[in-house]
Amino acid sequence: MLNVPTPSTLKQNKVIMILCDGMRSDTAFKEFGYVNSLCNNCNIGVKTTSIVDNPSVSKTNYETLHTGVPSLIHGITSNLVQDKSKMERNVFRDLTKADKTTAVVGSSWFYDLYGKDKYLYIKHKELNNDNGEDITYGRFFSDDIPDVVDDSSEGLAHTFQISEFLIYKYHPDYLLIHVMTPDDVGHANGIGKAYCKAVSKIDSVLGATLPRWFDIGYDVIITSDHGMDANHNHGGSKCDEMRAPLYILSKKGWSINGDKFKHTDIAPLILNRIIPDNDFKDYTEELIRNSDFKENNPDCID
């Protein structure tokens, strides 16, 4: 029997991050009717923009979002890089060491980065508290047996149903939900009607799920790994590619320092919410300070 969590059973802060792959900030700000209303009319969150890491591609920013350092330090500088994360610390490892649980519903690339082995679907399609894994519970999709892209609301609902199953069965301290449809539709059709419709469908599903997650005590971050340009592509420094929406939502109140964000800020934000007074931000700032990386470029190019 599933033990449905309630606010009384979720006394510690827990975070869900919804990563909408390839979702532009301007499209989210126009098409996310329900989520925008939470910030504009209910005062339970903030809506802003986060500048993604360069190159503005998926695997680079998966790593940046979970390590808090730019690609020129963490080394995942292309989707073609097949290495494991080389960073000593990341969101999954720090939470595991603190006896917290993590979960991922998303691309096998997250296992490629943070799992023990090379991803193999017959072994790693599901993780269920396997010893030695920093991802406690995983449900992964991959290209080794290609699936037909399903950009319907029913396909999105399936992703969120799996996520809700993990929430209600295991109560993870951190859950990453990875939605691929904006990226798939953007590459295929550009940023026109089909792209806007794909983003709007995500908002529809969030309207059915977020109220339940708030009621059981979860805080929610919604963002994307990168945007999409008029040429059906991303990877460069144009603002269409570099501006990601960032929603930070909580019914319990969440004091956030600053009003300008970069994707390097997200990992410390998550860890400090779940493990207060941790030193992850100090750790990442020291890495950046002692590296050759310099913040001397414009955020993006219009």
Image (cartoon, grey):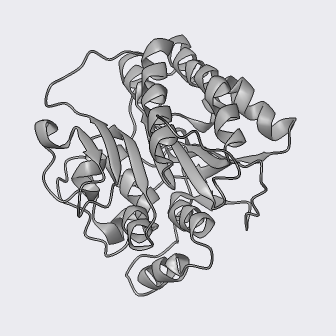
Place of residue 288 in the rendered image (x, y in percent of width and height, measured from the top left): 44, 79
In the image, residue 138 sits, relative to residue 100, either above or below, namely above
Which residue is the extreme one toward the front? Answer: 1
Name the quadrant of the C terminus: top right
Image side of residue 276 versus residue 3, left or right: right
Instruction: Locate residue 111 relative to residue 179 in the image: left or right.
Output: left
Closer-to-camera residue (59/10)? 10
Q: What number of labels is visible?
A: 0
Residue 191, image x and y in percent?
51, 22
Q: What residue is rendered at 31% in x and 61% in y?
A: 134
Q: Residue at x 26, y 63 (%)?
A: 85
Q: Is residue 230 visible?
A: no
Image quadrant where residue 117 sits: bottom left
Occupied quadrant, residue 135? bottom left
Can residue 97 be seen in the rendering of this structure?
yes
Note whether 215 is above or below 162 in the view shown: below
- The picture places residue 301, in percent across and down from the top left corner, at 54, 49
Q: Which residue is at 55% across, 12% downward?
A: 193
Query: Measured from the top left, where is residue 52 in percent x and y?
Result: 50, 52
Front-most of residues 90 and 190: 90
